[in-house]
Amino acid sequence: MDAQFALDLNTTPAEKICPYSDRSVSSGSRTASLDATSKHSSPVPSLSSHDSFKNSQEPRCPVIFTQEVDPNLIKISLDDRIAYLTDFLNFTSHDADVIKRIAPLVNDIIPGLVDDLYAKLFEFDITKKVFMTRNQVFMKAWARRVLTADYSNGKTWAYMDKVGIMHTGVSPFK
């Protein structure tokens, strides 16, 4: 293993080493602080050219662990697949609440949005073959359903799963 990416196992529980720089990250904080012995600058480019922004924001260390996901389990268990996807997307009850709050505002513009999307897709023969006109009706109904769904209900996730299966042509349940 490259020494640059090796974790220092002698660190205290309060300090973790970011494998991508010579910066340490305190437990409970995702922002990095400069190590007094640091000789190298961070390989991560600055997010802004504004000096005031650069000075006010410390560089962030990327996540230094990988969650293990059983690919077979997410194929056979809807609950486990939902847990994985909501974790991956960081989808929380707050997101579901936001969707519900904006639904009345977005509902009236769905037909126009879908029509514009399909007009763009139909500009090219290869996308037109995939997205046929009959799908427009379904897309409008789907968008409305997404906006009004109860994300705390398993039936919502079962529906989303079926839509995913329809788009991939592959059933995860074998």
Image: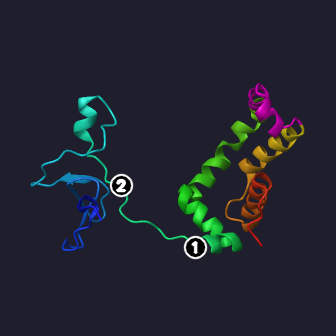
Residue 8 position in % (x across, y down):
22, 69
**Magenta region, residue range:** 115-133
Residue 139 position in % (x across, y down):
80, 42
Q: Which mark is residue 62?
A: 2
Q: Is residue 20 left or right of residue 174?
A: left
Amino acid type, residue under disc 1 in the picture: Asp
**Residue under the image location 31 percent in, 53 percent down:** 61
Q: Who is closer to the viewer here, 17 or 144?
A: 17
Q: Is residue 15 magenta?
A: no
Kindly give the residue lying farthest to the left in the view shown.
Answer: 37
**Residue under the image location 75 percent in, 39 percent down:** 107
**Residue under the image location 24 percent in, 40 percent down:** 56
- For the residue carrying disc 1, how many other residues have a C-alpha within 10 Å: few (<14), some (14-19), or many (20+)? few
Q: Kindly identify which residue carries mark 1.
A: 70
Q: Quadrant of residue 43?
A: top left
Q: Quadrant of residue 25?
A: bottom left
**Residue under the image location 12 percent in, 49 percent down:** 39
